[in-house]
């Protein structure tokens, strides 16, 4: 029951923070003649602030008794909190008696400092001590791979180089030196083996019986699922690695090469070496990393009304994919509408559309365009000028157009071009060498494949 | 009145009152308060969303425009799928899974260890082992093994990912086909194409999003439910087109009916349907209206796209088509045309791969070889043609059967079959994928030295479904449809994306 009241601590703490800060600000302001009338309100503010500070101290004490928090941190937080309460009471008592502005200002400033420190310590208790500064650290270590790349996996130590960093990034914030939720610490060998209040955190040789693995594998919605739903989850590779380590005796000294390596674990180890998590969520390397604003609804509606199929390339992005396959009548200004979404347009399919060299200029500023299909259009060499600065293009399909080597010459700035399709164009195999020089990294495909006729193609086998 | 009469009268009155109490408004409200409350509570809590449901993929389903294109939850590498299903189950041991050890055992009795506790569709007693009935060679830079049954396809191995250790738990055609395409061996689940068109809609609004083409003289054993929509809105079922004659029956207006009259009659029907919808609010009526409109547009678009005669002669030669006839090659060429037009999911079935060896057409060295002739050029041409048009990047091609075939020769009812043949086998078979963001020239999984069971890289139908959905931009675990009080998935409670094959 007492613990229940303790749970109100996170709610109540905001009252003294707010009220006392306001009171202190008012004290400082009221030193100026202009705000002198604030003085009448200050004792009341201080009284409420002091009272709420006392309530916070009491609930905080109850919460600390019930929770598994870092003892040191709790004790700092506790004494700082108490001193805030005491100082605010003192300030309330002396406020009317002290006539010296200097003293009042000094006490108020000290109180503000105390409140800030107490608040920060409280935040560290709830969110982890690195919560505030995490975004400042390079790569955040939040959602990325928990294990740094290991250049030579076989010679590395399983626990020290892989398991420990993994636990550190995924578990320590609640099961480490600061907090021991469920009485579990995972930051040292002896604690890992000792387990938490439910015991059996790690059963050597039996991952399936180890509470550590069991909880990780529980459905995300299960109350006991680890890591908690709102925290970064372990990737499949990381789980596989933990299971493999436990199944092979959860040894703290051995190197990777000392443990048996089945087919299941080999790809995991390979990706450790590369420093990438092969099973982590697919990186959206198809989408530029830069976040952009959503396209204007009006332009989208106009395009859709004209028959253009236009949708974001995925649900969580503003980059768009447009396809003109349903456009029956290509009005003059439809392509011009693309200008209003020039930042968002990522994929564009104009196959069979009535587009010519002149109207194509509408896309010359679509800087993010990465896939463009101009198959069977009226585009000629002159039209390709519009593409010359679209350096994010990865795939360009010019099948069935009249482009020649001269036109391709204008594409030499497209350094990211991976695929260039030139089937049924005026470009011949002989031109390929020249294009290769311009765009050395691009896969060129002039198509026109033939399948040889073999005598057996027509053989019909019959029963003897 | 006597005392008895009085009593009786009182009893009757009481009974009436009791009865009336059951019919009073007050009684109704009192008794149903709990139920109404619960209903209200349910809708209140329901609107709290995340309280009770996980962050499942929400698909905006608009019954009036069911096929409008939608964004996948994640960026998909593939935009379309062409699934080539060899109904009857081709023999992996004569096509892709070369087992020299099996050759050595040819003609020997099957070791009891391979039979103990196993069930087969036809094999009874002790069958003989049967060595590979084809010659194999390594091909391409990847060195993939392909038999001489597929001389043209063997030049394409560097574009393809082979899954050599596919497993299933169904050894009869119909349930095994259902498992591959609907995620359940029993009837009633939506097929993969339905899920995909439900989730993504279709880019082309004048054609169905999910087209089915069959060849080989017979439908797949599982019948049309293998492209059914199950509990998904019926508009997402596969539309079967014919590869001979009109693509869809009665697509031409009958004599005396011109286009304007057709339009007028469809408008009249839709008006009536709209009235019906105002009255009943059944979203299926909106789907029906949309379907009528689609059918009207398809009258123009379908004959055009389903007509392969406009293709140049060298393309026909490449695919090995037989214009005017119903055959696999024509269907494959159609599949390419449909992908070009933005159709989302194209499902081909080719019947006649069930090489038991009970007659020559069903044998490994007669019937199977003839079957291979009919697909070798078309599948090779499909990959090359998609590639040269820049479509292979965004089109996932899948080829496979519903299960594999035994390393033993079939002995039906204990008597050896007259021709070389193999029984249905669930433990290991080969499926390949190409394009759509899967690796090129890659092999995943391995079988033991006689090709009996998978020893590494085992995958099953659910894993393949999860992978196909992944390539299209779906997390198969989050892609659900609420039905009968719970969210359903294509992959049910199983499946794992085969990350190894994703490029």
Image (cartoon, helix red, strand yellow):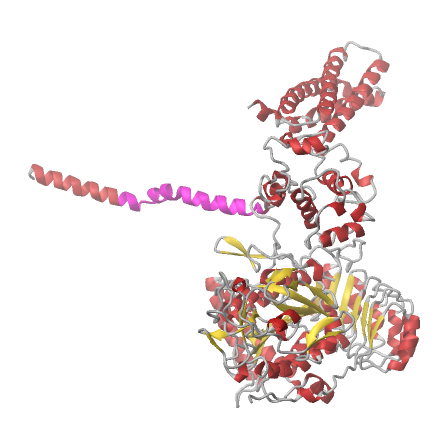
The number of numbered discs placed on residues in the rendered structure image is: 0
Is residue B459 shown left or right of residue B313?
left
Residue B24 counted in the magenta span: yes
Residue A301 in sight in this render: no
Q: Position of residue A288 (x, y in %)?
A: 80, 57
Q: Residue furthest top?
A: A97
Residue A102, quarter of picture: top right
Q: Position of residue A30 (x, y in %)?
A: 81, 20
Say if B352 sits above or below A274 in the image: below
Is residue A459 shown left or right of residue B251?
right
Task: Judge by depth and name the residue closer to the eye, A95 or A88.
Answer: A88
Is the N terminus of chain B in the top left, top right, bottom left or bottom right quadrant? top left
Q: Residue at left 92%, top 78%?
A: A406
Say if A222 sits above or below A308 in the image: above
Give the magenta part as a residue range. Answer: B20-49
Say if A450 sits above or below A229 in the image: below
Task: Judge by depth and name the residue closer to the eye, B158 or A288.
Answer: B158
Q: Position of residue B319 (x, y in %)?
A: 69, 83
Residue A310 in sight in this render: yes
Residue B33 counted in the magenta span: yes
Task: Judge by depth and name the residue closer to the eye, B370 or B503.
Answer: B370
Magenta stretch, main secondary structure, is helix
Is the C terminus of chain B in the top left, top right, bottom left or bottom right quadrant? bottom right
Q: Position of residue A50 (x, y in %)?
A: 70, 18
Residue A24, quarter of picture: top right
């Amino acid at each position: 029951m007492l613990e229940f009241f303790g749970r109100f601590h996170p709610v109540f703490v905001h009252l003294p923070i707010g009220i006392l800060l306001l009171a202190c600000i008012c004290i400082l302001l009221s030193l100026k003649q202009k705000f002198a009338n604030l003085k009448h309100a200050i004792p009341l503010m201080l009284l409420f602030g002091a009272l709420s500070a006392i309530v916070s101290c009491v609930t905080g004490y109850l919460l600390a008794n019930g929770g598994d928090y870092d003892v040191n941190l709790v004790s700092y937080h506790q004494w700082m909190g108490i001193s805030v309460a005491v100082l605010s009471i003192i300030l309330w008592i002396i406020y009317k008696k002290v006539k010296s502005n200097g003293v009042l200002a000094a006490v108020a400033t000290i109180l503000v400092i105390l409140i800030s420190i107490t608040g920060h310590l409280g935040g560290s208790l709830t969110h982890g001590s690195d919560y505030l500064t995490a975004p400042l650290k390079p790569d955040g270590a939040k959602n990325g791979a928990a294990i740094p790349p290991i250049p030579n996996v076989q010679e590395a130590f399983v626990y020290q180089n892989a398991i420990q960093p993994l636990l550190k990034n995924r578990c320590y914030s609640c099961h480490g030196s600061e907090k021991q939720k469920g009485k579990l610490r995972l930051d040292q060998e002896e604690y890992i083996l000792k387990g938490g209040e439910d015991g059996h955190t790690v059963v050597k040789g039996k991952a399936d019986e180890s509470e550590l693995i069991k909880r990780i594998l529980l459905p995300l919605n299960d109350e006991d699922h680890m890591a908690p739903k709102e925290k970064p989850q372990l990737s499949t590779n990381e789980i596989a690695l933990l299971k493999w380590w436990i199944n092979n005796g959860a040894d703290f000294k051995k190197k990777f090469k000392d443990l048996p390596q089945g087919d299941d674990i080999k790809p995991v180890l390979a990706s450790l070496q590369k420093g990438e998590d092969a099973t982590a969520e697919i990186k959206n390397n198809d989408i530029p990393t830069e976040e952009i604003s959503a396209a204007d609804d009006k332009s989208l509606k106009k395009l859709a009304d004209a028959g253009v199929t236009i949708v974001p390339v995925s649900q969580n992005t503003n980059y768009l994919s447009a396809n003109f396959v349903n456009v029956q009548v290509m009005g003059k200004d439809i392509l011009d509408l693309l200008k209003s979404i020039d930042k968002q347009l990522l994929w564009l399919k104009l196959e069979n559309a009535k587009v010519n060299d002149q109207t194509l200029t509408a896309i010359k500023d679509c800087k993010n365009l990465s896939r463009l299909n101009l198959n069977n259009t009226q585009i000629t060499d002159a039209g390709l000028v519009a593409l010359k600065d679209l350096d994010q293009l990865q795939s360009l399909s010019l099948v069935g157009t009249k482009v020649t080597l001269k036109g391709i010459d204008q594409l030499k700035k497209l350094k990211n071009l991976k695929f260039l399709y030139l089937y049924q164009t005026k470009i011949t195999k002989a031109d390929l060498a020249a294009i290769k020089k311009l765009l050395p990294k691009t896969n060129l495909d002039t198509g026109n494949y033939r399948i040889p006729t073999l005598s057996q193609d027509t053989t019909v086998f019959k029963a003897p | 009145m006597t005392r008895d009469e009085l009593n009786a009268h009182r009893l009757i009155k009481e009974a009436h009152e009791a009865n009336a109490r059951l019919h009073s408004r007050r009684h109704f409200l009192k008794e149903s308060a709990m139920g109404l409350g619960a209903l209200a509570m349910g809708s209140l809590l329901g609107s709290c969303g995340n309280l009770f449901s996980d962050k499942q993929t929400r698909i905006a389903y608009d019954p009036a425009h069911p096929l409008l294109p939608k964004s996948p939850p994640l960026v998909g590498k593939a935009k379309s799928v062409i699934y080539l299903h060899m109904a009857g189950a081709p023999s992996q041991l004569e096509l892709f899974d070369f087992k020299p050890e099996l050759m050595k055992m040819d003609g020997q009795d099957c070791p009891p260890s391979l039979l103990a506790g196993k069930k087969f569709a036809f094999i009874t007693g002790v069958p003989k082992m049967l060595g590979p009935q084809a010659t194999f060679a390594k091909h391409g830079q990847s060195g993939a093994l392909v038999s001489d049954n597929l001389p043209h396809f063997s030049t394409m191995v560097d574009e393809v990912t082979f899954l050599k250790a596919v497993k299933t738990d169904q050894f009869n055609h119909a349930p095994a086909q259902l498992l591959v395409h609907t995620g359940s061996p029993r009837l009633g689940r939506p097929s993969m194409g339905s899920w995909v068109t439900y989730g993504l809609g279709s880019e082309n609004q004048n054609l169905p999003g999910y087209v089915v083409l069959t060849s080989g003289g017979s439908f797949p054993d599982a019948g049309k439910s293998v492209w059914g929509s199950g509990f998904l809105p019926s508009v997402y079922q596969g539309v079967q087109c014919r590869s001979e004659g009109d693509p869809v029956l009665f697509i031409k207006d009958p004599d005396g009916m011109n286009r304007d009259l057709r339009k007028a009659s469809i408008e009249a029907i839709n008006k009536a349907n709209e009235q019906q919808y105002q009255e009943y609010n059944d979203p299926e009526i909106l789907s029906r209206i949309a379907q009528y409109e689609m059918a009207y547009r398809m009258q123009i678009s379908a004959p055009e796209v389903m007509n392969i005669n406009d293709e140049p002669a060298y393309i026909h030669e490449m695919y090995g088509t037989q214009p005017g006839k119903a055959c696999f090659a024509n269907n494959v060429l159609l599949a390419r045309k449909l992908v070009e037009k933005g159709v989302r999911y194209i499902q081909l079935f080719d019947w006649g791969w069930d090489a038991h060896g009970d007659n020559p057409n069903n044998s490994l060295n007669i019937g199977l070889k003839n079957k291979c002739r009919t697909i070798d050029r078309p599948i090779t041409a499909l990959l090359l043609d998609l590639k040269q048009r820049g479509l292979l990047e965004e089109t996932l091609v899948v080829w496979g059967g519903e299960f594999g075939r035994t390393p033993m020769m079939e002995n039906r009812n204990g008597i050896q079959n007259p021709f070389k043949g193999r029984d249905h086998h669930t433990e290991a078979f080969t499926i390949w994928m190409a394009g759509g963001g899967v690796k090129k020239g890659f092999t995943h999984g391995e079988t033991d030295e006689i090709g009996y069971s998978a020893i590494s890289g085992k995958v099953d139908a659910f894993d393949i479904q999860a992978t196909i959905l992944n390539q299209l931009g779906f997390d198969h675990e989050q892609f659900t449809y609420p039905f009968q009080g719970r969210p359903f998935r294509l992959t049910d409670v199983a499946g794992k994306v085969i990350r190894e094959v994703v490029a």
